Amino acid sequence: PSSDALADFQKVLHERYEVKRDIRLMMWALPANGHPMDVLQTTIASMATFYPDAGAQDPNSAYTQSALTKIIANMSTLVAMWARISTGYDPIPPSKEMSYAKNFLAMSFGEEPDDDIVKLFDACLILHAEHTINASTFSAMVTASTLANPFASVSAAVGTLAGSLHGGANEDVLNMLDEIGEVKNVRAYIENRLKNKAVIWG
């Protein structure tokens, strides 16, 4: 987008960062050990109750576009909120003065992030957005093709992304690294996995 178009879109997101009070209360009621992807899928689906006509509208209508920007804006807030709630900390309100990436990092970790970290995270978000037709994107498209509301479509995508053969593989990689422990154990670990025809994640 042009710099003006980007600035306009960022302004829209800033105005919609805030999560509905009822959803915040629901998050506090969920088990603290709940998997983040399950919590995200649940909260996004519940947002549909505030936009009851989104599925009945033309996909290009202002109403539906408003719902979609609300999802994008709330996504970072919801993830950051759960990162705090599930570890015993109070959520940090979103700031209307920060970029999307910087705001997410600040809400998650409780301090203003280094500019280099913000740039790196921004690049990661762009790369993921450009990932084209993966399983979760396809899942969202299938759900949307039934004229389901945008919240159902994105919720379906999140559920698909959680699978260990898709985005959940990232979690399996981290678990695998914990199993390996130290660099000196890598060769023996890999050889054992290959010998037993076990999956090597990543």
Image: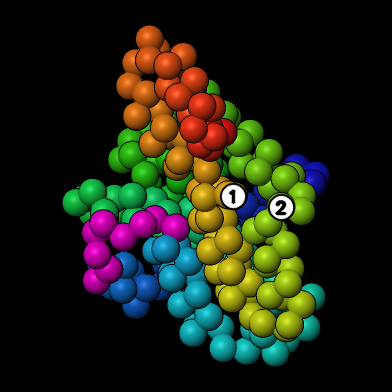
Residue 116 magenta: no
Viewer-closest of 13 and 81: 81
Q: Give the residue displayed 45% in from the left and 40% down from the top.
A: 172
Viewer-closest of 64 and 11: 64
Tell me if 152 is positioned left or right of 38 in this view: right
Viewer-closest of 129 and 53: 129
Q: Give the residue displayed 26% in from the left and 57% down from the top.
A: 33
The CA span between labels 1 and 2 is 9 Å
Could you classify mark 2 by the number of other residues whose Cα lies within 10 Å: few (under 14), some (14-19), or many (20 or more)?
A: few
Magenta-highlighted residues:
29-37
Query: Label 2, on which residue?
Result: 134
Residue 30 magenta: yes
Mark 1 and 2 residues: CB-CB less than 8 Å, in contact? yes
Amino acid type of the residue tagged 2 in the rendering: Asn
The quarter of the picture where residue 2 lies is top right
Q: Look at the numbered disc 2 and give the secondary structure of its residue.
A: loop
What numbered label is drawn on residue 166? 1
Q: Of label 1 and label 2, which has the lower sequence position? A: 2
Main SS of the magenta part reads loop
Q: Give the residue displayed 61% in from the left and 36% down from the top.
A: 124
Say if residue 75 shows up in the picture: yes
Residue most extreme to the front:
195
Residue 114 place in picture, x, y as percent: 44, 26
Q: Is residue 144 above or below residue 137?
A: below
Residue 12 place in picture, x, y as percent: 61, 61
The quarter of the picture where residue 123 lies is top right
What numbered label is drawn on residue 23? none
Residue 21 place in picture, x, y as percent: 34, 74
Residue 39 place in picture, x, y as percent: 39, 63
